[in-house]
Image (cartoon, rainbow, N blue to C red):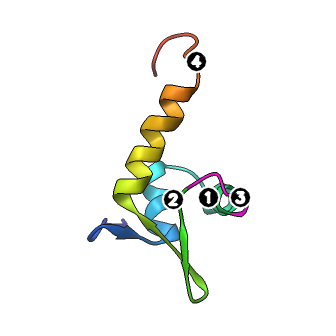
Amino acid sequence: MVEYQGEVLTILELAAYLKIPKSTLYKLVREGKIPSQKVGRHWRFRKGAIDLWLEETRASKPVSGGDR
């Protein structure tokens, strides 16, 4: 089990947090669709920026069939 330590998440931690495969997360990073920063060879994500991105993404898409 992955624990979320601090405000900065790794790919593995963020994939677990979002409950998506790492491959999907890498695709979002590659396409520039998720706030991220590369530190050396490693991607890092600020949890606060991710939470804001989730809210903005949710708000920008019409809800069909109710909020799941």
Do callouts 2 and 1 mark residues in contact (Cβ within 8 Å)?
yes
Q: Give the farthest residue toward the left.
A: 6
Instruction: Report which residue position mark 2 lands on.
Output: 15
Q: Give the farthest residue toward the top.
A: 65
Instruction: Report which residue position mark 4 lands on.
Output: 62
In the visual, does 60 lie left or right of 33? left
N-terminal-most mark, 2 or 3: 2
Is residue 22 magenta-colored?
A: no
As measured in the structure, the alpha-carbon distance from the residue carrying label 2 to the one carrying label 1 is: 7 Å
Instruction: Report which residue position mark 1 lands on.
Output: 25
The circle on residue 27 is 3
Q: Main secondary structure of the magenta part?
A: loop
As measured in the structure, the alpha-carbon distance from the residue carrying label 2 to the one carrying label 3 is: 12 Å
- The magenta stretch is 30-34
Do callouts 3 and 1 mark residues in contact (Cβ within 8 Å)?
yes
Amino acid found under the numbered disc labelled 4: Pro
N-terminal-most mark, 2 or 1: 2
